[in-house]
């Protein structure tokens, strides 16, 4: 995997540094219940599916599918192989889910079959997997007219191995209709002597419409690409026109085969790491930051190019590209900041923090060319805080009767997310990553479809907040746009130890989490209060309040599916489909 060459640009206008907390609201949430004629096809993990990746891919699978083209319409597959659709128009008059397609009367199952998976490709197409290795491309017609027309299979292929569908899109170019489908498998790695013994495979296949002869026309696979990695991706989606692929994963993926032919991978070069001299050095206190940049000897102040705003900085020499440029980690006060030339060969910059106290982990977002220098006072303070963790003994464990931790006994889930956690964009032609974002230290929260004509959005934790990012593959210079923020949701969700699914409304009016059983938490965006409300501690009037609501389902069954629309939450168990009326628009 290529080194990180891109950083996500936070829109600070969408952050609220004055956000206090969510206020618990006891307002009831109308809840409606639809009893299912047959149970949802839930597949339990087998003894051979013991790894953390099996649990992430199949044990935490969301069995409920939201139709982004038609509002308040959801689909799922039951144990009879029926694809069922429920479209809500009036909550108090919910009908039974309607059958739109049946895989088979008695679906034959292979030994390692998985749950059926569905991806709504466009407003008139869908991709379906039966969990046993068969891929169906279905022409659905316009699904939102309420007629529930039966879907027509126009392409069926037996791939030979079970898989789940991660994403699919369709597009028309030069009069040819093409479907892009992304499949996920976890396969045994016979060459691996250590580790879990499995690897993750992504197969990107492209069926296209072809005229076989004058009287026969059909869809045929025109291209197959295989990617290989060691972790189940948190996010994987194909661009709307099929020109690229985006993957967010804790361990990198690489293309291995195209149309059955191996992709030549560059041989890893084993060499001693070359030490690169940093371009700048920086120190910080709770109040300010000092940056020292190396400059050409004999530099005059007229030759210095210096530009500073509250969120961005650009420093360089006139006539040359900037030495340091980009978005600052946090805001500064330009009026209280200054620079001075030292010894005619270095530039010293003093940046005054706008918010005193928090320490910055980096100076410029994504810039790794500098070196942080810790002051003697800071080093002494850290040493003092860590003294209680040290000992003169080789094993300073006060519990002598207990053996020390054995790292070989640790599971994959015991490890902290690695620095290799990245978001990468792959070019369809070169098969190489063009943009790579280092997400180390940023927890991935959920994926949500906001605009069906765009790629799915990513929600990632940033400090205590949850930030929603919209991929823009047509804008290489600004490929991921920060479009929404859920205040403190990153912090709040971390306290939910039994959390299973998370999502948000497409209009970002609320975010929601659910536990494995019963409980659902709803976090609304701040809204104006109807009465006068004062903050007693600060002695000021409160104009907006963010509400939290809790709903408990009348069911002891495990939650298998969880989706949100602008007005409703849909929650699926093995025997019931619950509809929660969250907003009245």
Image: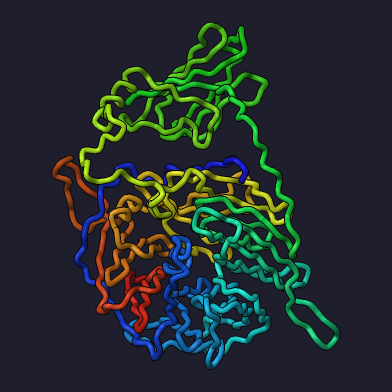
Residue at screen point 57% across, 65% down: 187
Residue name at image x 14 percent, y 44 percent? 536
Single out the residue that lies furthest toward the left. 536
Toward the front, the furthest residue is 401
Instruction: Tell me residue 438's x, y (percent).
Output: 52, 43
- Name of the residue lying farthest toward the bottom: 105
Left or right: 3 in relation to 469: right
Q: Residue 267 appears at what percent x and percent y?
A: 70, 44
> Vertical placement of 311 versus 197: above or below?
above
Residue plotted at (44% across, 75% down)? 64
Place residue 31 in its image quadrant.
bottom left
Looking at the image, residue 173 sits to the left or right of residue 48; the answer is right
Between 301 and 364, the residue placed more toward the observer is: 364
Nearer to us in this view, 332 or 35: 35
| Residue 131 place in picture, x, y as percent | 54, 78
Residue at the right extreme, as displayed: 214
Image position of 563 (left or right of 293): left
């Amino acid at each position: 995997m290529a080194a990180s060459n891109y950083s996500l640009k936070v829109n600070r206008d969408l952050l609220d540094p004055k956000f206090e907390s969510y206020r618990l609201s006891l307002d009831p949430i109308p809840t409606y219940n639809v009893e299912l004629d047959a149970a949802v096809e839930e597949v339990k993990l087998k003894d051979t599916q013991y790894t953390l990746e099996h649990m992430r891919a199949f044990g935490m699978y969301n069995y409920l599918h939201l139709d982004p083209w038609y509002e308040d319409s959801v689909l799922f597959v039951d144990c009879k192989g029926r694809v069922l659709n429920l479209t809500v128009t009036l909550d108090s008059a919910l009908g039974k889910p309607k059958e739109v397609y049946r895989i088979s009367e008695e679906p034959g199952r292979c030994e390692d079959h998985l749950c059926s998976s569905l991806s709504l490709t466009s407003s008139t197409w869908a991709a379906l997997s039966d969990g046993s290795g068969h891929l169906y491309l279905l022409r659905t017609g316009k699904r939102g007219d309420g007629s529930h027309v039966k879907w027509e299979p126009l392409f069926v292929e037996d791939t030979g191995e079970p898989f789940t569908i991660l994403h699919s899109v369709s597009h028309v170019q030069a009069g040819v209709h093409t479907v892009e489908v992304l499949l996920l498998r976890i396969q045994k790695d016979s060459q691996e002597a250590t580790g879990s013994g499995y690897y993750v495979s992504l197969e990107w296949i492209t069926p296209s419409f072809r005229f076989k002869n004058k009287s026969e026309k059909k869809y045929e696979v025109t291209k197959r690409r295989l990617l290989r990695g060691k972790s189940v991706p948190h996010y994987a989606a194909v661009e709307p026109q099929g020109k690229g692929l985006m993957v967010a994963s804790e361990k990198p993926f690489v293309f291995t085969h195209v149309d059955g032919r191996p992709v030549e991978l560059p041989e890893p070069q084993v060499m001693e790491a070359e030490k690169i001299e940093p371009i700048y050095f920086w120190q910080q206190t709770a109040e300010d930051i000092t940056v020292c940049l190396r400059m050409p000897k004999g530099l005059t102040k007229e030759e210095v190019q210096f530009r500073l705003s509250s969120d961005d900085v650009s420093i360089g020499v006139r006539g040359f590209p900037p030495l340091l440029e980009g978005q600052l980690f946090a805001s500064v006060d330009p009026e209280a900041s200054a620079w001075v030339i030292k010894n005619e060969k270095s530039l010293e910059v003093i940046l005054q923090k706008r918010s005193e106290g928090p320490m910055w982990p980096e100076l410029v977002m994504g810039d790794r060319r500098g070196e942080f220098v810790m002051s003697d006072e800071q080093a002494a303070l850290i040493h003092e805080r860590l003294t209680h963790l040290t000992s003169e003994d080789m094993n300073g464990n006060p519990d002598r009767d207990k053996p020390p931790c054995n790292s070989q006994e640790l599971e994959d889930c015991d490890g902290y997310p690695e620095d290799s956690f990245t978001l990468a964009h792959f070019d369809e032609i070169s098969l190489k990553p063009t943009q790579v974002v280092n997400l180390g230290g940023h927890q991935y929260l959920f994926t949500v479809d906001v605009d069906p004509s765009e790629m799915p959005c990513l929600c990632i934790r940033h400090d205590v907040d949850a930030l929603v990012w919209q991929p823009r593959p047509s804008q290489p210079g600004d490929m991921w746009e920060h479009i929404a923020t859920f205040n403190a949701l990153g912090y709040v969700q971390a306290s939910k130890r039994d959390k299973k699914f998370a999502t948000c409304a497409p209009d970002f009016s609320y975010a929601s989490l659910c536990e494995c059983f019963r409980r659902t938490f709803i976090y609304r965006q701040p809204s104006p209060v109807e009465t006068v409300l004062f903050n007693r501690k600060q002695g000021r009037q409160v104009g907006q309040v963010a509400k939290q609501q809790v709903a408990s389902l009348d069911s002891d069954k495990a939650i298998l599916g969880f989706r949100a629309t602008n007005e409703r939450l849909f929650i699926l168990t093995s025997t019931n489909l619950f509809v929660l009326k969250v907003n009245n628009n």
